[in-house]
Amino acid sequence: MNHWGIFTDNQTNKKELIQKLQNNKFLDIINLKDKTGKLFSQLALRKFMEEEEKHGTKYISNAGQDLKTMSSGEQKKALLFHILDQKPDYILLDNPFDNLDIGFQSSLRDLLIEKSRETILVQLASRKSDMLPHIHNFAKVIDGQLIVVKETSQHENEEMNVFSGNIPPPIDPIQFDGNILISFQKVSVSYGEKHVLKDIDWEVKPGEFWQLIGNNGTGKTTILSMITGDNPKAFGQEIYLFGKKKGSGESVWDIKEKIGYFSPAMTDSFSGRHSVENMLISGLLDSIGLYIKPTEIQKRIIKDWLLLICLWDRRNVQFNDLSLGEQRLVMTVRAMVKHPPLLILDEPTSGMDDISANMLVALVNKIAEETQTTILFVSHRKEPGLNPKKILELKQTEEGSIAIVE
Ligand SMILES: Nc1ncnc2c1ncn2[C@@H]1O[C@H](COP(=O)(O)OP(=O)(O)OP(=O)(O)O)[C@@H](O)[C@H]1O
């Protein structure tokens, strides 16, 4: 079997690349003619979710749960088993290990190695360490063309970006003078028979830098949604945010104005045409479009942020035209520009190449060092170089996940 690994970076137009591979446009290099193929990707998952929503049929879940209520790892597992059931001649794997916990990453690796005896694998990888060990043919896309490369030619120029200058200060600091920012006391969550969280005790103090880790489905997103205010399961529980008991009459706005939030899914929802500069200014104004004329001081602060992340020269470029890595940097800055008491970054590096992920990690470390903002960074990967001071790990038990604090 002739398997292929294609190195992508955050400049690669992956949609086009996948279409070209499916339509056999790189025949002289990767020949998939007359073969049946399946796509294992976020895009394929999104399509299944849309279908589920439209027709109410559960296409890839035999456990009866809607795809959209599954955790991101559970969704990927469901898709993979659905694909394997159909025994395709080849599988296009688009960053297969993203969003998967370490345990499942290694069982997926073993499963793919086993399947590779009868199925051609074409793996798109933005991280070199993700490439499956039994792939020995490599290519990358240069100017829309697929070029054969040696493995070692990828990422050899990796270097950590060092930001010049300091984190720009807030214009109007958002006040929070308490000693405890978040407190969970014996918080438990279940969906019917399914126990997700069990007696979670957790205390976060101002200025701390936390990483939240745990296997797929252990309840990381559930915890975040109880903090940000979206989850009705939070009510009636002993959850205190910014010194107030959750559900004690505080408005959603009271909570939202104290939290900067970024998850990669947000980037997908920005379909409008906004310049990079306006995207950041609108972060100060809490709107997506720019309907109010910014003040001079607002413009100056945003200029300083753009200089810091080396995008000042590209301030007039449309946000959607930035590379994925640049978009993530801008969105992280957008969540931070007001110096909220709490910054939540939900899997911010998923799908990023090594170089871009390093830059984002460096920016987060810098924010942690130079500001008073408390950071919650959710990630499966042990991000090389990330310096959280505390870790909350969710461990699954029969009665729901318990919390272990390091
Ligand atoms: N509305 C719902 N109905 C049934 N189960 C649900 C619902 N919402 C969440 N769950 C379940 O709760 C569990 C925790 O999900 P959650 O998304 O919090 O996990 P996670 O740790 O963020 O996972 P991942 O790392 O895969 O994103 C999962 O098993 C999920 O299927």
Image (spheres, rainbow, N blue to C red):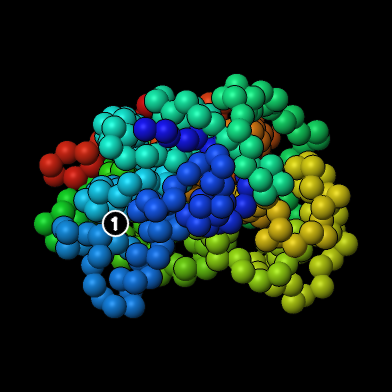
Residue 322 horizontal/vertical position (percent): 71, 54
- Give me the residue at 55% from left, 39% from top: 29
* Local secondary structure at mark 1: loop
Front-lying residue, 174 or 298:
298
In this picture, is 386 found above or below 167? above
Q: Is residue 8 left or right of residue 399?
A: right
- Give me the residue at 26% from left, 76% from top: 56
Q: Quadrant of residue 204?
A: top left
Residue 5 horizontal/vertical position (percent): 49, 35
Residue for badge 1:
70
Q: Is residue 214 left or right of residue 323?
A: left
Residue 137 horizontal/vertical position (percent): 50, 29
Asked if the beta carbon under badge 1 is closer than 8 A to the nearest atom of ligand 1, the reply is yes
In this picture, is 230 found above or below 385? below
- Give me the residue at 60% from left, 66% from top: 270
Front-lying residue, 251 or 154:
154
Q: Is residue 358 visible?
A: no
- Give me the residue at 67% from left, 49% from top: 144
Mark 1: amino acid: Met
- Quadrant (top left, top right, bottom left, bottom right) of the C terminus: top left
Front-lying residue, 375 or 195:
195
Residue 122 horizontal/vertical position (percent): 44, 41
